[in-house]
Amino acid sequence: MSEIRMALVGCGGMAKSHAAVMEKLQGKLSIVAAVDIDLQKAEAMAAALGIGRVATDYREVLPDVDAVFLVLPHHLHHPVAMDCLAAGKHVLLEKPMANSEKECLELIEAQKKARKVLMIAYCMRFHPLVVRLKELLDKKAYGDVFQVSIWTEQLTIYPPGHWASSAKTLGGGQLFSHGCHYIDLLLWFLGRPLSGTHVGTNCGTPWMEKEGTSNVTIEFEGGKLGYHFGTWGARGTRLGYSIHAHCTEGMLEANFRAGKLIAIVKGEEQVLYEAERGKYTNFEMEHFVECITEGKEPLTDGPGSLQGLRVIWKLYEAEQNHTVADLRGLGLDEFQG
């Protein structure tokens, strides 16, 4: 296939972080259209990337592209992605896939019918520190893993009336919107979940209708445990963005702010790998291109992405009922439509 022609649909803050990597894909992929309901945002993105075409309606550009990258408010993921798949376009869709199980299942079926790539943009799966941590855990380089803990501490404030403050348009709270990255990683690292709990609050984040701070504990097969703490209310942080994997022969730490993967064995630290700070969305985009050109199944496909969201919905439900969530059958390899 010649160079893939892509439309960037949604030119807000998230799109800007992705757009910076596009120059690394020259010859493989080019953005030929910038689309946003706000014409000024589309024009600004086009000017920044040297894009020749702008539009306020994604449907105008579909006849002239091979693929779309959808960076939209969550409640728009389903209808826009459905239209694009029906038009025979490959779709890279920002996480989370959609705001309900029904919508996710419809997208999965639409992808099968269209026989095009549907990839969910879980960029953390492609971060070099995460990839190397996964490799070490899989080969038991430091023994058997028995606990993985993930922290994300940031201050994210939305203005009144912003779509991300509303549970209806966001799809939930901080756990659904941002924590979905890390529930996905826990499933990837630890395998099949059995049960779990979630406790969230919007204390400290009053701009959020639902939780702005989230605590998740999950039990996995084999007695392994996973934990995730995420907040959008951090006025300070020490852990920042980090993963600790406790194994029977040592502990592994992925410190994203320092850009280091560290092993700690018997009190001695060893830096195993260093990476510059960043989201490494270029690796995510390269994988999307490979899936199109080589017919590969995306690492972050629809079924696997839905499994992570099913875990979150089960956790939310159990929290409301003051019970422990039954998560059996929700491993990445256990998808049922």
Image (tube, rainbow, N blue to C red):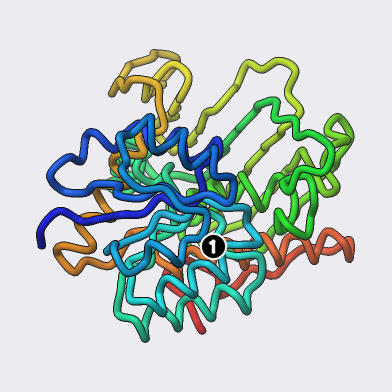
Residue 15: % across, % down? 47, 40
Examine the rendered structure and indicate whether residue 89 appears above or below residue 252. Answer: below
- Label 1, on which residue? 97
Residue 272: % across, % down? 29, 23
Residue at position x 60%, y 33% from top?
A: 151
Residue at position x 78%, y 45% from top?
A: 165
Residue 30: % across, % down? 24, 47
Residue at position x 48%, y 49% from top?
A: 185
**Residue 141 seen by the camera:** no
Occupied quadrant, residue 92: bottom left
Residue type highlighted by circle 1: Met
Residue 252: % across, % down? 42, 30
Examine the rendered structure and indicate whether residue 78 appears above or below residue 254. Answer: below
**Residue 261 seen by the camera:** yes
Q: Secondary structure at mark 1?
A: loop
Task: Tell me if 308 is positioned left or right of 2 in this view.
Answer: right
